[in-house]
Image (cartoon, grey):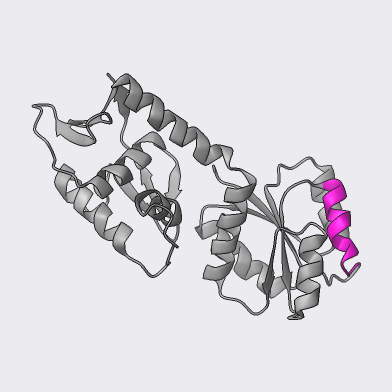
Amino acid sequence: MDKATILSVDDDEGLQLVLKEYLESDGYKVLRAHNLKEFAMWAEQGESIDLVLLDLVLNDAQGLSLIQTIREKIKSPIIIVSGKTDTTEKIVCLEMGADDYITKPFEMRELSARVKAVLRRAYPEIDKSVSQTMAEIKTSGEKIYFENWYLDCGQYQLYDLNDNSAELTTGEFKLLETLVLSAKKVVSRERLFEITRDGANYDSYDRAIDIQIARIRKKIGDNSKDSEVIKTVRGVGYMFCATIKNN
């Protein structure tokens, strides 16, 4: 989804600063509240909040009832960020409406992956709209032009303006198609992995997507250090930046 807004509710200023820096590098907008009073201020301002990261021990409130308090003001998904490792508490949090639970200390990569997963479950219409667009274009036989190329979704291939094939593999075509149909929006590596690997479990250490992107860039001549067609968004994924024209 487009630049989701995350509200972090935690009285640990050091953790707040680290969370903000990391998640903003992932492309999110991050708001901070150090206590329940500050949270209420954000909620009353009508700020659009897509996800809440919530510590259950604040300096002006604590306990499982915080989940209900947050839910009464904001209907967005909640990830509990807690120092407690007790399994029973985790289960109760989930039963009370939390969408996920992560235990401190944690690696920021794990938190980022959990944030992406919760957002994907909470807002499935984003992925659904892209899939629907793909289906419509394939059915109509429409061609999508960019730079000196056109993407033929019906033939699963990329051609130059002289009708010479770029000879993309099926995996490369799926990657490029997804990026083109999500033009000007960042698509995560995880999402690209899901599309090309038919539901296989995502491994953040797997560099297959990066290798395929490099091959696509080479085939379309997008080899400069500052790529103009497919841009790398550090720590997140890729974005298709070329101007698109339909047939």
Residue 226, visible in the rendered structure: yes
Q: Could you say which is closer to the camera, residue 93 or residue 30?
A: 93
Q: Could you say which is closer to the camera, residue 29 or residue 206?
A: 206
Q: Is residue 88 left or right of residue 118?
A: right
Is 5 in the magenta?
no
Residue 223, visible in the rendered structure: no
Is 65 in the magenta?
yes
Residue 246 position by quadrant: top left
Specify the quadrant that holds the C terminus.
Answer: top left
Q: Could you say which is closer to the camera, residue 139 or residue 176?
A: 139
Q: Residue at x 59, y 62 (%)?
A: 114
Specify the quadrant that holds the N terminus.
Answer: top right
Q: Is residue 142 left or right of residue 239?
A: left
Q: Is residue 94 above or below residue 45?
A: below
Q: Is residue 226 left or right of residue 127?
A: left
> Residue 80 location, x and y as percent?
73, 66
Residues in magenta?
Answer: 61-73
Q: Residue at x 50, y 41 (%)?
A: 127
Q: Residue at x 32, y 38 (%)?
A: 177
Q: Main secondary structure of the magenta part?
A: helix
> Residue 20 location, x and y as percent?
62, 62
Q: Is residue 33 above or below residue 15?
A: above
